[in-house]
Image (spheres, coloured by chain):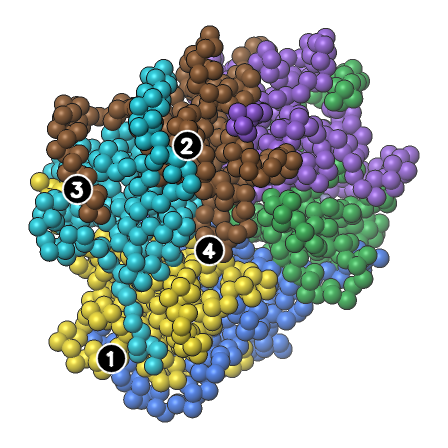
Chain colours: A cyan, B yellow, C blue, D green, E purple, F brown
Amino acid sequence: MKKLIEGLHRFQAGYFKSHQDLFESLSHGQNPRILFITCSDSRIDPNLITQANVGELFVIRNAGNIIPPFGATNGGEGAAVEYAIAALGIEQVIVCGHSHCGAMKGLLKMSKLAEDMPLVYEWLKQAEATRRLIKENYSHVPEENLLRITVAENVLTQLENLSTYPIIRSRLHQGKLSLHGWVYNIERGEVLTYDPVIHDFVTLEQRNNSPEPEYIYNLYPSCSVSQAEG
Amino acid sequence: MKKLIEGLHRFQAGYFKSHQDLFESLSHGQNPRILFITCSDSRIDPNLITQANVGELFVIRNAGNIIPPFGATNGGEGAAVEYAIAALGIEQVIVCGHSHCGAMKGLLKMSKLAEDMPLVYEWLKQAEATRRLIKENYSHVPEENLLRITVAENVLTQLENLSTYPIIRSRLHQGKLSLHGWVYNIERGEVLTYDPVIHDFVTLEQRNNSPEPEYIYNLYPSCSVSQAEG
Amino acid sequence: MKKLIEGLHRFQAGYFKSHQDLFESLSHGQNPRILFITCSDSRIDPNLITQANVGELFVIRNAGNIIPPFGATNGGEGAAVEYAIAALGIEQVIVCGHSHCGAMKGLLKMSKLAEDMPLVYEWLKQAEATRRLIKENYSHVPEENLLRITVAENVLTQLENLSTYPIIRSRLHQGKLSLHGWVYNIERGEVLTYDPVIHDFVTLEQRNNSPEPEYIYNLYPSCSVSQAEG
Amino acid sequence: MKKLIEGLHRFQAGYFKSHQDLFESLSHGQNPRILFITCSDSRIDPNLITQANVGELFVIRNAGNIIPPFGATNGGEGAAVEYAIAALGIEQVIVCGHSHCGAMKGLLKMSKLAEDMPLVYEWLKQAEATRRLIKENYSHVPEENLLRITVAENVLTQLENLSTYPIIRSRLHQGKLSLHGWVYNIERGEVLTYDPVIHDFVTLEQRNNSPEPEYIYNLYPSCSVSQAEG
Amino acid sequence: MKKLIEGLHRFQAGYFKSHQDLFESLSHGQNPRILFITCSDSRIDPNLITQANVGELFVIRNAGNIIPPFGATNGGEGAAVEYAIAALGIEQVIVCGHSHCGAMKGLLKMSKLAEDMPLVYEWLKQAEATRRLIKENYSHVPEENLLRITVAENVLTQLENLSTYPIIRSRLHQGKLSLHGWVYNIERGEVLTYDPVIHDFVTLEQRNNSPEPEYIYNLYPSCSVSQAEG
Amino acid sequence: MKKLIEGLHRFQAGYFKSHQDLFESLSHGQNPRILFITCSDSRIDPNLITQANVGELFVIRNAGNIIPPFGATNGGEGAAVEYAIAALGIEQVIVCGHSHCGAMKGLLKMSKLAEDMPLVYEWLKQAEATRRLIKENYSHVPEENLLRITVAENVLTQLENLSTYPIIRSRLHQGKLSLHGWVYNIERGEVLTYDPVIHDFVTLEQRNNSPEPEYIYNLYPSCSVSQAEG
Ligand SMILES: [Zn+2]
Ligand SMILES: [Zn+2]
Ligand SMILES: [Zn+2]
Ligand SMILES: [Zn+2]
Ligand SMILES: [Zn+2]
Ligand SMILES: [Zn+2]
């Protein structure tokens, strides 16, 4: 705690003093453009890795960057998603998994958790879609690669889940919302992003060379319902 | 009831007698190829409109052909879906809405239900994604068309919801499962089916002329994770 | 699917064409007289076995024809029951189990389901009253008869559960509602119905000879409360 | 509190001292013969009104002597019921309502509770079956009698609910369990008991004169399943 | 039951007759000063051990005198607590555990309960905070003392839980509410009470000698928020 | 998104390159010393304001930095708390509210949220203890100060809630856990911390001058149970 308190003083004397106008202005309201959903893991610092300023990222963090399907839980995840989009008008949502994720490790050996960490055990059941997919489709994969794939598939599971939320389904329909799937690699300091066209995670370099640099992730089956209307 | 009991006798003396072998054979086990999810509405008879034989359709029926997202309810819907796919190996799932649906009418005027039909009111909250989408995106549509669109959009909502179920997400990944969205029109005796390529509901005739008559509905973002694995 | 689409055409060209007036009339509203609750099993076709017309049966189908007690789940069962009685004014409710029911087989060996079909496992807990009754009272019964008894007792369990629903309790009190317990035998094409007077399931023939052919199942302890009022 | 502490001393010096053997014996285990379910109301003292000794009544008390249907809540009611019957082997269950019950008064004007007592409001929804029955069947009753009837009907609602519990359904089937409905009248010091034969609440005097003084309340439709077994 | 009915007559002819004025007066409303929360155990008679009159104790009884944290269950516990404080204005709350508590015994060997008493098993999970504390902190204690400590710690767990209820948190802030932790010893007829100053359970004698005989249990961190207001 | 991607490159080329050893070392496991619970608000950057390094803070973020009582929700909050303490051995927990919190503003005018943000509305019910306390105890406070007090009281509510979690209750008992309440003031760049001795929030300066610089927040009523053991 001592270190933390010293940090607070360093912050106040340093960064805060030199950005006082920014903070004064922020005290009148936030206007973030990104909803950043990531793991509670201490090795992820969203503002650091994106070099985003204070005020730019609205952040949800829990164990395993899990967003349960609409209605499946009454925790804070859905409320924060709804607030970000309905109240703040955010149009970019990033779900960011990461290498060496303890929650995903837990998911691969659930049964060990039931006794000592019953709440973690229950929570990971919300990622059952990830677990079953891995178990039924990646049995051939050597164990050292399994975690990596689990992390990636779990990000996609959460994108599926997100699209069941009323506010998200409605905004996707309007073409006003983009969902992005990221995997942050701690040891390489690198982010892979899901490319729904080639159905794979690619480096930012690969994405950058594409003609469409700000790709909008869109799995929504929009419905012009001309027939239905007729 | 009298009529029903007479009907049972008529069935036994007629259809049953002439198909006794079929029933004898079915008594050793069912092997349906279709999971048919539709409304409880009395005007829908799944076997009649598809002319399917006894033993061909595994059927889930509730008010509004709603399948809540994975984990959102503890009713029978998820269990029946899981049983159909995991135990019976079904690979074709149809969600079939219908014209003049009372549940969808209720969804458009929810507040009137709270007092007299509290359970219906609570249940329709599971279709909130449909309700919000309609409210925020179809305010310009004349009221007489709104129900039709609601029915169609609701079918798509349920397809989204279905894809959050572990067994479905896993089988979609394997390419072993198809999800179909239907709207049955009572007065025309006709079915419209959702075409994810052109993003609209089309008649079976239109689909028939296409090069790919048994289209597999696929909104799943499959993930080859070559990078993630590397 | 091909077969199904062909069936749709056959339906439209055949049955629909010859009953166009019925369907036109039904498009203005349904008026079913029976709430028919049965299993999702593909071998049951409610309209076929009762020879009921389109528009006569309001149908709820899930795995095991289970209606959890009021408030126990937030699935579609309660809502459909409430809608049938409060909105459609239905006065006859049938719970129809059936021979060779896979859900009831599952109930007799629950533990095997937990891993592979967790949703089915959870759902069958709603039939725990049936399971415990069988376990504690039929230990002497040879295994080949146990399923048959489980199916029958489960129908009675659901009648008990139904009577906890507010709309049902209220209408039973008015004498305006009848609850019927049926077991459909696939290989015999026959229905047994519960007779609350002799406390057993009997064939329709046996019931037919009774002086009261449309027996109203009534387990409701009505309360004239003369003392309470005084 | 002072008064209470003095009471404790009085108890220890008086009743406890003169019954020390009873308490010593009870410290080796309880063996109550009655499960007594009643309201938290301070005006009811189960041991006083039944003159039962310490060790004779296993007691559940909450606002309104409500036992929600099996599975409807995760509060302590179901557990205590199960413990009483499965662990203690109790075979007599009494649900005892009472005149001037504040919870039942609340049930008749629910809407006033939502804001100030949200937990009471939610809890009383568990007695919705009582509320709807009263609203739909006793509109003609003058207000001063309505509470009395509500209390009586609510006792019967709870008997219905009780019969959905697995342990209760199983023991009723064995004929080893009796459910009794009581209404205690505070100002008369009198108990009315439900008589399922004449469908009314009667005084103990009336019951006493009957040939069957310890009537067993039995609404269970037992099933000999001879046909089902055959 | 016979004995009980005789008891009712004895009560009416004896206690009721001699206290008719009290009961008449109570019929106009209750005004209890104590909320007494205790176990369903038949060996506890709250009015007897405190020698309290009819009308003085508002009583909640369940297996293990457990009050789950606010929002954790939808059973009757929270509603009764809220009613006692918000509607009746009660300012003294006692949680009274007891020696030889069967529920607490169950808590120490939970796994044995899952199969035969599933509802008890689920309910005791509400006392998981007690179970974990005992398991992680009292491993050195000989088994014959463990139950006694479990009972005592469980009373404190419930006091913690109580303080999460809105009405309680608000009234504690006003200084208008006292929470008391009691353990009743059946074989000694004695009550130990928790003393938050010395952090231990003490006999009433010890408390009596203190300068503050009606100690108000206060774990609430009140907040004058002078800085926060400034 | 463009800006974000540029930021990622800047991070990789700059901070990551110069701290490659730290990241390499972190890829072998995290060892954070602080569980930092704060709002999703974009104006809070935990690592910035505490100047903590990557790897030092395990972070939970949701709307309003709310941790519902144990068992009240099945969202990610409890799991992350449990993981932080049981798996990572964290011994310092900070709940950090902040000035101008949108969630707390919402709490003060709940009714406006029900229609447009139903999930936020439901989520804020988890802070009902804060809302009721404010409503019943601060009616005299001018509106411009009310938000500030709400934020502060809400931090304390969450500390109360935290102490109902089994792992927390157990570790508090061991004296191995400290709970801290912070309020971060955006426009002053300053943190107030709750001082349980003087029952108020104070600046770090005030705390610094005190003899006990790293105060451990301890509201736990530890129980030496000497009597109980005897
Ligand atoms: Zn992680
Ligand atoms: Zn419909
Ligand atoms: Zn079946
Ligand atoms: Zn009462
Ligand atoms: Zn006990
Ligand atoms: Zn905030």
Q: Nearer the viewer, mark 2 or mark 1?
A: 2
Task: Let me know if marks 4 and 2 both belong to one chain.
Answer: yes
Q: Nearer the viewer, residue B186 or E143?
A: B186
Task: Let me know if marks 1 and 3 both belong to one chain.
Answer: no
Look at mark 3 in the image and give the residue it sits on. F6
Earlier sequence position, callout 4 versus callout 2:
4
Q: Nearer the viewer, residue D204 or B182?
A: B182
Identify the image quadrant of the N terminus of chain A.
top left
**In the image, C194: left or right of A6?**
right
x, y percent for residue C110: 37, 48
Look at mark 4 in the image and give the residue it sits on. F116
Earlier sequence position, callout 2 versus callout 3:
3
* Residue that appears at 47% across and 13% down: E141
Look at mark 2 in the image and give the residue it sits on. F187
Indicate which disc residue B204 carries: 1
How many angstroms separate mark 1 from mark 3 (CA)? 49 Å
Q: How many callouts does the rendering have?
A: 4
Q: Nearer the viewer, mark 3 or mark 4?
A: 3
Q: Does ligand 6 reach within 8 Å of label 2's beta carbon?
A: no
* Residue that appears at 31% across and 34% down: A40
Q: Quadrant of residue A44?
A: top left
How many angstroms separate mark 3 from mark 4 (CA)? 35 Å
The amino acid beneath tag 3 is: Glu
Disc 2, SS: loop
x, y percent for residue D81: 59, 41
Chain of the residue on which disc 3 is drawn: F
How many angstroms separate mark 2 from mark 3 (CA)? 28 Å
